[in-house]
Image: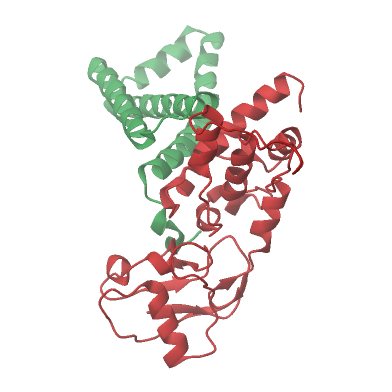
């Protein structure tokens, strides 16, 4: 795909589909790392404790809230698609996609504020 | 304006055309063929937005050129016009529409009568839910703009595409049709309605303001229930 192909691909719904796909990929990459971290607890308290101390850094907390944003975006975006495919059609999908992004950002920001 | 010349491995060539009031994109393409280069190939018929044969890619976006005013789409007095995407290019601005129409056939897009001419004419209430669903999707002019805009078609050459599935949805909701089961089977197969990712580019760009995504979502529900009931 070249830049020429992107010229009509900028509607809110196309961007929602792109965000859904990319957030899904990011979460697929994150999940093994998440389980690896949980696995530290099996090896003993010290390795997990040292990782948790490392994760107290502001940049890591920022990355965590970005992760929460992606998770929310993927979950609510997926729910929107399930509604489209399993219930009667509802107009206003652009607004629904915008609300999904807004609610996801609000939740991520709320948790980020609580972390500091 | 730049026009695509040649086949799949062609290139854009530049032409100067006069800017006039109330000219359509089809008008300027016609000007090039009539006055600058008679070897230019393109396709049109009705010129009034009914036949669906003049669709091209205008400044990167699939459009019906006979109803698209130059003043609305030209950027800094320039236009770039190419053939529709997702279809083989025959020459210049003409694409081979066979894959598009073959998929209409695969989706069982032809009406199958359930009665004979000797039977009474079936009474259909215009306000019945099935007729309302069919009416909402029935004004397709086969222009293939949705097919050219669809990313799933781009990724999956077996995908039937928005127009064929939209047509199938109108027939599934037509109580006079006698092939619903076969049609649901056809659209539930690989490359059918369940391959749609609901990007809604088809709805965004349909010149008739139809919503093929809604039709495809309807087919997804109907095929799922038909499968659960053991009908397909």
Q: Which residue shows up at 45% across the image and 78% down it?
A: B3
x and y percent of residue A46 in the render? Answer: 45, 10
Answer with left or right where residue B93 lies relative to residue B60. Answer: right
- Expressed as whole percent of the image width and height from the top left, the position of residue B192 reads 66, 41
The image quadrant where one finds the C terminus of chain B is top right
**Coloring scheme used:** by chain
Identify which residue is drawn at 71% across, 19% down.
B228
> In the figure, the red chain has which letter?
B
Q: Is residue B133 visible?
A: yes
Residue A35 position by quadrant: top right
Residue B198 in sight here: no
The quarter in which the N terminus of chain B is drawn is bottom left
Image point (45%, 63%), residue name: B49
Front residue of A50 and A79:
A79
In this picture, residue B219 sits left or right of residue B54: right
Between B200 and A58, the one nearer to me in the picture: B200
Please give left or right for residue A115 compared with residue B37 in the image: left
């Amino acid at each position: 795909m070249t830049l020429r192909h992107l010229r009509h691909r900028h509607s809110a719904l196309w961007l929602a589909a792109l965000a859904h796909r990319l957030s899904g990929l990011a979460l697929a990459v994150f999940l093994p790392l998440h389980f690896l971290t949980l696995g530290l607890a099996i090896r003993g308290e010290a390795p997990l404790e040292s990782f948790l101390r490392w994760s107290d850094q502001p940049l890591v907390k920022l990355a965590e809230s970005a992760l929460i944003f992606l998770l929310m975006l993927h979950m609510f975006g997926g729910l929107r698609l399930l509604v489209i495919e399993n219930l009667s059609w509802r107009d206003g999908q652009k607004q629904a996609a915008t609300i999904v992004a807004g609610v996801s950002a609000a939740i991520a920001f709320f948790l980020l504020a609580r972390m500091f | 304006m730049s026009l695509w010349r040649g086949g799949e491995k062609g290139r854009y060539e530049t032409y100067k055309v006069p800017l006039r009031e109330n000219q359509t994109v089809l008008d300027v393409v016609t000007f090039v063929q009539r006055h600058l280069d008679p070897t230019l190939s393109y396709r049109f018929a009705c010129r009034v937005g009914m036949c669906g044969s003049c669709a091209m890619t205008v400044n990167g976006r699939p459009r019906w050129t006979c109803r698209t005013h130059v003043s609305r789409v030209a950027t800094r007095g320039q236009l770039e016009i190419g053939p529709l995407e997702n279809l083989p290019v025959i020459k210049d601005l003409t694409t081979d529409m066979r894959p598009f129409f073959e998929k209409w056939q695969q989706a069982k897009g032809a009406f199958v009568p359930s009665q004979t001419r000797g039977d009474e004419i079936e009474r259909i209430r215009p306000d019945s839910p099935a007729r309302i669903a069919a009416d909402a999707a029935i004004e397709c002019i086969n222009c293939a703009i949705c097919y050219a805009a669809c990313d799933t078609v781009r990724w999956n050459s077996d995908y039937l595409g928005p127009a064929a599935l939209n047509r199938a949805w109108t027939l599934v909701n037509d109580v006079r049709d006698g092939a619903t089961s076969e049609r649901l089977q056809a659209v539930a197969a690989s490359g059918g309605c369940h391959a749609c990712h609901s990007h809604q580019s088809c709805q965004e760009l349909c010149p008739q303001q139809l919503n093929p995504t809604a039709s495809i979502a309807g087919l997804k529900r109907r095929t799922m229930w038909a499968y659960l009931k053991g009908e397909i």
